[in-house]
Amino acid sequence: MIEARATARFVRTSAQKAGLVLALIRGKDVNRALATLTFTKKSVAGDVAKLLRSAIANVQQKDGFSGDVDRLFVSAAYADQGPSQKRVRPAPMGRAFRVLKRTAHITVRVAERAEKIAPVGADGEKAKRRPRAGAPKKKVAGRKSAA
């Protein structure tokens, strides 16, 4: 499975605000993620879209990539807090308020989906799945319950 990542450092937004946008694209196919970012009204969506395109380009440069961009998906997307710029805002009566201008380090990982291989039984049909553990059992006609 081929995987690549792209990181944008010192993006002028808070990590919390960037995380809201990254949650929208996490786990989606790259084409759907880019479409989602195009119509997202947050200002950081443009930076994330640029970062996603960079991650796609990084995957295409790797050895062993199949060349099919449609099989790529966003495997991880997260934002870490960067350094805060400290500024001073004048306040009444000679005082001052401190303003924190936050930054974030945004990382997007893109991976290639594995090909789906369906298990085939001996008679050429798909193998039947076993019921889940703890699943309610189906009632069989003709049996009485012990209640």
Image (spheres, rainbow, N blue to C red):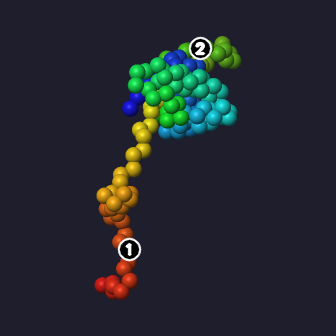
Label 1, secondary structure: give it: loop
Residue at 49% x, 35% y: name it: 71
- Disc 1 marks a residue whose amino acid type is Lys
Q: CA distance from mark 1 to mark 2?
A: 67 Å
Residue 43 or residue 144, whichever sits in front: 144
Q: Is residue 147 above or below residue 103?
A: below
Residue 68 or residue 27, whichever sits in front: 68
Residue at 67% x, 17% y: name it: 91
Residue 79 x, y percent position in the rendering: 49, 27
Q: Which residue is denoted by mark 1 in the rendering?
A: 138
Label 2, secondary structure: give it: strand
Left or right of residue 86: residue 116: left
- Disc 2 marks a residue whose amino acid type is Arg
Residue at 56% x, 24% y: name it: 53
Q: Which residue is denoted by mark 2 in the rendering?
A: 87
Residue 118 x, y percent position in the rendering: 39, 50
Res. 12 image quadrant? top right
Residue 82 visible, this angle? no
